Amino acid sequence: MLFSDIIYGPIKSRRLGISLGVNLLPLHSKLCNFDCIYCECGWNEDNREDKPRFNAREDIREALRSTLSKMSEEGQLPDVITFAGNGEPTIHPDFESIIDDTIALRNEFAPEAKVSVLSNATQLHREGVRNALHKVDNAILKLDSAFTATAKLINKPQGDYSVERIVEQLKAFGNEFVLQTMFLRGEYNGALVNNTTESEIEAWLAVVEYLRPRSVMVYSIDRATPCQTLEKVCREELEKIAERVRALGIECSAV
């Protein structure tokens, strides 16, 4: 499922409420430095290099202004403006400036709305990305396993990726972020996929306790996935994981 517009929705988000989406990435394909086996946008290999890689800052600003102005006139403002779309939003070269534009437009048209970013946390080494994520209301940063091998199987990251490095970058970022984890089971290319085992959960909880984020979101598959041999984790099991996070004194939602 690809988003064919810069601004999409608003949609009812199970995590965020009435969400107006912002897509910084191609309108024709996915562009991401992860290739998660559960991604609703499909595989990276579908990307077409003959099309623009990023939406222009000016186009994003004007599309958001037009949508928020119309929603304001209709008295139907969003609860949240969410950066997600067809891949990883923080890889956009103008990400910090776009966040500045968005906050200004939010303040003008929808001052009660929150600004949220869904990110895989791989760009925290970039100062501009850190600055931008500190400005938004909800920096929602992904970590799907405490083990690099499992994360590589689930997320298929590009380049030299290690959970240890991401965890230290999250620690340096500070605890004003929301940690988000997808739990799932199944098979991918003949390998078993399962980040719900006791060893996985114990290691993940140790990372959660070390980072002590503002809050944690645990969730599972809700839409069609490119890998069709995956199994959704039930709400009851997610809630048990959430209870173990809450026992650490950290807020946690299971959605």
Image (spheres, rainbow, N blue to C red):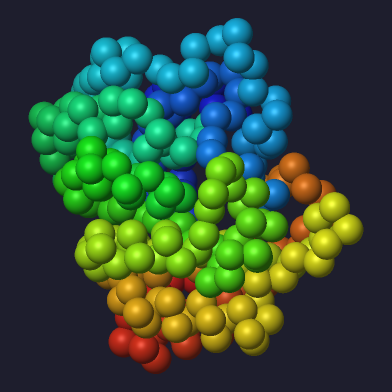
> 204 and 172: which one is in front?
172
Q: Residue furthest front?
A: 160
Q: How many marks?
A: 0
* Outermost residue toward the right in this view: 190
| 205 up-or-down from 53: above or below | below
Q: Is residue 9 left or right of residue 130?
A: right
Q: Please tell me which residue is depicted at 53% across the width and 53% down the height of the picture.
A: 161
Identify the residue at horizontal 33%, vertical 59% (top origin): 169
State the residue in front, 168 or 255: 168
Q: In which quadrant of the rendered image does the N terminus lie?
A: top right
Q: Can you name the residue that lies furthest to the top here?
A: 50
Q: Residue at x 59, y 47 (%)?
A: 157
x then y, percent, for residue 167: 40, 66
Would you say 199 lies left or right of 241 here? right
Residue beneath the point at 69% across and 36% down: 43
Foreground pick, 175 / 60: 175
**Location of residue 159 with respect to 231 vertically, above or below:** above
Residue 8 in which image quadrant: top left
Image vertical order of residue 215 relative to residue 19, above or below: below
Is residue 177 something one can see in this rendering?
A: yes
- Residue 129 location (% of width, % of height): 28, 41
Mark yes or no: residue 79 visible.
Answer: no
Q: Is residue 5 above or below residue 255?
A: above
Which x, y percent locates residue 116?
A: 31, 46
- In the rendering, at what x and y percent does residue 181 appear? 51, 64
